[in-house]
Image (spheres, rainbow, N blue to C red):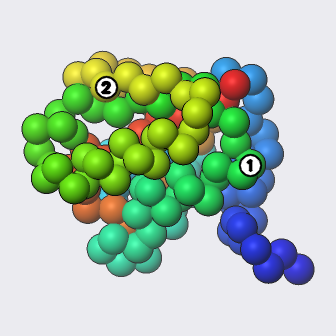
Amino acid sequence: MLQEGILNPHVLDLIARIRHTNTLVICDWAFPYWREIETVDLALTRGIPNVLDVLKLLQPNFKVGHIWQAEEFLNTNPPETISAFDECFSSFPEAEVTREPHLDFKTRVPDAIGLIRTGDPTAYGNVIIESV
C-alpha cells in the first residue's frame, strides 16, 4: 500500500503515461471541461487541493522542462500569490516559464495527455507543464 507521495491511482496512472515532451494541465476549479482529454478531478472543496499542492507532489516524479501560464494571472492576483507561484516554479530548475495570453494558453490544452482539476480558486492559476 502506498503511504507517501501521490496516493490517487488515477493521477499515478496518468503521470505514468507521460513521455518526453508530453504536457499535463493542472487547473483551477472553474477551468472549462475538455471532453477530448482525460480529466482527473481532485476538487474536494474551495481551495482543496490547490494547483501548487499538486505541482509540489508531482515534483519528485516529473521532470519539467517548460511551464505555461496565462499572463492575466499577473494582473488579477495579489503579490503574495504571484510570489508563491514563482517560488514553486523555481523549484523546477530546468523549467522555462512562459506567460502568454489566456486564449493562447487554452490552445495548448487539447494536445495534453491529461488534465488534473483542483479546487483552486486562484484567477488564471492554471498551468501546463511539459516533461523533459
Quarter of the image containing the C terminus? top right
Quadrant hosting residue 37: top right
Residue 16: image x %, image y %?
A: 79, 45
Q: Amino acid at mark 1?
A: Asn
In which quadrant will I find the N terminus? bottom right
Q: Does residue 88 appear in the picture of this structure?
A: yes
SS of the residue under disc 2: strand
Instruction: Identify which amino acid the numbered label 2 is placed on.
Output: Arg
Q: Secondary structure at mark 1?
A: helix
In this image, 110 relative to 85: left or right? Answer: right
The residue lying at 21 percent from left, 39 percent from top is: 73
- Image side of residue 54 versus residue 87, left or right: right
Crowdedness near tag 2: few (<14), some (14–19) or many (≥20) residues, C-alpha within 10 Å: some
Q: Which mark is residue 61?
A: 1
The residue under the point 31% across, 25% down is 99
Is 61 located above or below residue 36 in the figure?
below
Q: Nearer the viewer, residue 76 or 108?
A: 76
Drawn side of residue 115 relative to residue 64, left or right? left
In the rendered image, the residue lying farthest to the right is 1
- Marker disc for residue 99: 2
First in residue order: circle 1 vs circle 2: 1
Q: CA distance from mark 1 to mark 2?
A: 24 Å
Instruction: State whether residue 36 appears in this view.
Output: no
